[in-house]
Amino acid sequence: MIVSPLAPASYPELKPIAGVRLATGEAGIRYKNRTDLLLVELCEGTTVAGVFTRSLTASAPVLACREALKGGGARALVVNSGNSNAFTGSVGVASVERIMAMAAKEIGCKTGEVFTASTGVIGERLPDDKITASLGDLKDKLSDTSWEAAAKAIMTTDTYPKMATRSLTLGGKTVTINGIAKGSGMIAPDMATMLGFVFTDAAIGASALQSMLAQANETTFNSITVDGDTSTSDTLILFATGQAGNPTLAAPDAAFKKALHEVLHELALHMVKDGEGAEKLVTINISGADSTKAAHRIGMSIANSPLVKTALAAGDANWGRIVMAVGKAGEKADRDKLTIKIGGVVVAKNGEADPDYKEAQIDAHMKARDIKIDVDVGVGNAFATVYTCDLTHRYIDINGSYRS
Amino acid sequence: MIVSPLAPASYPELKPIAGVRLATGEAGIRYKNRTDLLLVELCEGTTVAGVFTRSLTASAPVLACREALKGGGARALVVNSGNSNAFTGSVGVASVERIMAMAAKEIGCKTGEVFTASTGVIGERLPDDKITASLGDLKDKLSDTSWEAAAKAIMTTDTYPKMATRSLTLGGKTVTINGIAKGSGMIAPDMATMLGFVFTDAAIGASALQSMLAQANETTFNSITVDGDTSTSDTLILFATGQAGNPTLAAPDAAFKKALHEVLHELALHMVKDGEGAEKLVTINISGADSTKAAHRIGMSIANSPLVKTALAAGDANWGRIVMAVGKAGEKADRDKLTIKIGGVVVAKNGEADPDYKEAQIDAHMKARDIKIDVDVGVGNAFATVYTCDLTHRYIDINGSYRS
């Protein structure tokens, strides 16, 4: 397997989080000779928050998580790779119920305190017996140091495991936030699914936790795109064990929000960097928009344009395609005030090419791994940043090769 | 140049249309040794209708056409390839004005009766002097038989010229509709631009003409997609010379609408067949939707999904990706009633894979040039059809190669 050229040189070391123990195993769901199952045990009193795909064809595990979230508490997380248990009808729902029941039995908790996620091929029945048969073994192997193993067990065709960590002081106590995620790798190959699991030992009420997660998600995971396709299984869950000893937060806290945002941002950028076929990380800053939502939509229109992405793959500073993508976004923009910078260099302003601009000025920038595009649409004061990768031949190789 | 494998074996012969004369020339706007300029003369009394890009960064010629359309009459059309005169600010506006003035002088009409379109690289100043200097020569060469030459002169990197024709009886007279178009070829390469010009000798009032054009456009050009990108220059204009001698139509006519729809449909399919890198024509029928608009949006979500399109390129009947695209469209769909057919074979129904389906059943269909996908979303009675092509390595070659 080719590791993404944008992969980090080394992985961060994730310290134990009091109240969290993890174990991974080979259940043989689809892959051979690699881990494909993760069990996480959470101590009593753990609160939970989650955000999920907006897809109308959401997978059975997503529906079950949404339901479990209403309770506000969590004691276990079970994640498998190899099969997404999506578009599997009532059979898929029954699979999730059996996994939740077995995990509840092993951990000793209520079924409604078990969260599950599945990633992989869709439309095939999940061999849940392989999962339920493995949970006892995994329970015996639970440890507080298995973070990298956990990040690896949820990978599909991700080319590297994705981890991030931050510590901060909260109510006089040091608290830690650990996150693992999988991104737009393909399975079988079938579809890109984003899964993210974040753990903290901070004591935080479920409502404050949900509020902080939803807010941080908007500018991190919801601001990245690889190919504009939305998975049926996208899942981001945040667990707070409350073991750090800080006074329980009943409302959002600025320092925690900042650290949480940093963890999510780091994980989200890893997803782009490991996007299918990615060779460049592209940061798109939109300013001068009518509203944050408009700025975001214009940014996404650029980030999802195949014409922009193929040009970037070729190192071509083809800003005409950026103009096109601004125009098709359907949001207010003033063509005659549009300013476009690439790598900090003004290439177009006031509705036409900047007469002082020479392509040679940004040659080196276009050949680098990090591309920066700034667009001011000239109608207001709102701004947003989105991230994407380029569109290369390898994207087609990965997604066009036959499943079997 | 590689001609699209979906190109027709032969081109239709377009008969003269009374009141229409055409001429093409080599103005040397960007290309060498190929025609890049088209002049069409229209007789007095010609009515006109047009639909244009919805892009908010529309090109200078599009803005001028919208303005000229208010007059309801047309005497000349000037089209150049090689430069789209888009995002060229006030300089671009002045270029269009000079071209319109010169064409009006040569043809002997008002400036407001001249329509222009430009396709090609954007953000570069149009050398309009090369166009105005050529119009006199072109006027001397006007002929009523130069249809194929006209279709060729407006090509950018289209791999074949696009023409369609129909005749019908209207008020006891035979009337003809001729159409030429250019599609999603790239120039320089810069952006896909769709241009379509349709001519008829029927006598039709401008308002009826506009109504019929707008309606036929919805289910033809507005129902195709190559890569989801919207050009700044998309233009479709219909001219009616009134020379057939039929009593002037003041209201839409069913027979004319049908013939017009057939011409537009044929041209629209040619655009898909000549889409960048296209190797397969994909017809997507959506039924059971809440509204026509919802059906259209779900169809476009499938047609624009890079994951669906790469799978089709590989001949992979990966219907899970179709489920994903239905889910992300944001329109009402009943996951548990969703039915998907590929090549007429049911592959999924009632929210899961059809247990009777074997991939071998559709092997031959997936390898063919024409792919048919039927999706019933199970919530209503509305339907729509959209057309697209597959996403191949050649798309990336065409769009990722450097402009210079």
Image (spheres, coloured by chain):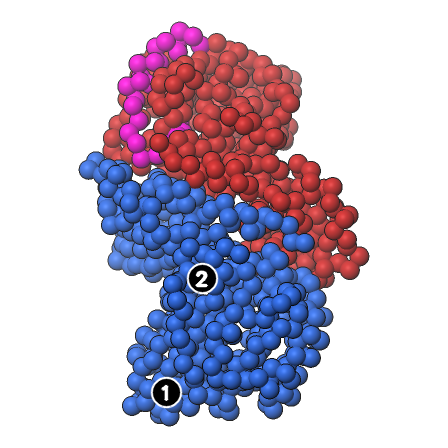
Chain colours: A red, B blue
Residue farthest left in this picture? B356
Kindly identify which numbered label has been placed on residue B278.
none
Q: Residue at x 50, y 39 (%)?
A: A395
The answer to if A156 sits in the magenta stretch is no
Question: x, y percentage for residue A188?
Answer: 39, 31
Q: Residue at x 39, y 86 (%)?
A: B202
Q: Residue at x 60, y 85 (%)?
A: B139
- In this rendering, which labeled residue sits more in front, label 1 or label 2? 2
Q: Is residue B210 visible?
A: no
Mark 2 lies on a secondary structure that is: helix
Task: Name the amino acid, label 2.
Answer: Met
Mark 1 lies on a secondary structure that is: loop
Tell me which chain the residue with mark 2 is part of.
B
The answer to if A120 sits in the magenta stretch is yes
Question: x, y percentage for residue A238?
Answer: 49, 26
Q: Which residue is mark 1?
A: B249
Ranked by sequence position, the earlier of labels 1 and 2 is 1
Question: x, y percentage for residue A180?
Answer: 52, 24
Q: Which residues are magenta?
A: A115-142
Question: x, y percentage for residue B289?
Answer: 30, 55
B356 or A292, nearer to the observer:
B356
- Say if B10 sits above or below B349 in the image: below
Residue farthest right in this picture? A356
- Say if B42 sits above or below A358 in the image: below
Q: Which residue is mark 2?
A: B271
Residue farthest top in this picture? A140
Task: Name the amino acid, label 1.
Answer: Leu
Crowdedness of circle 1 by 10 Å Cα count: few (<14), some, many (20+)?
Answer: some
- Say if B205 sits above or below B385 in the image: below
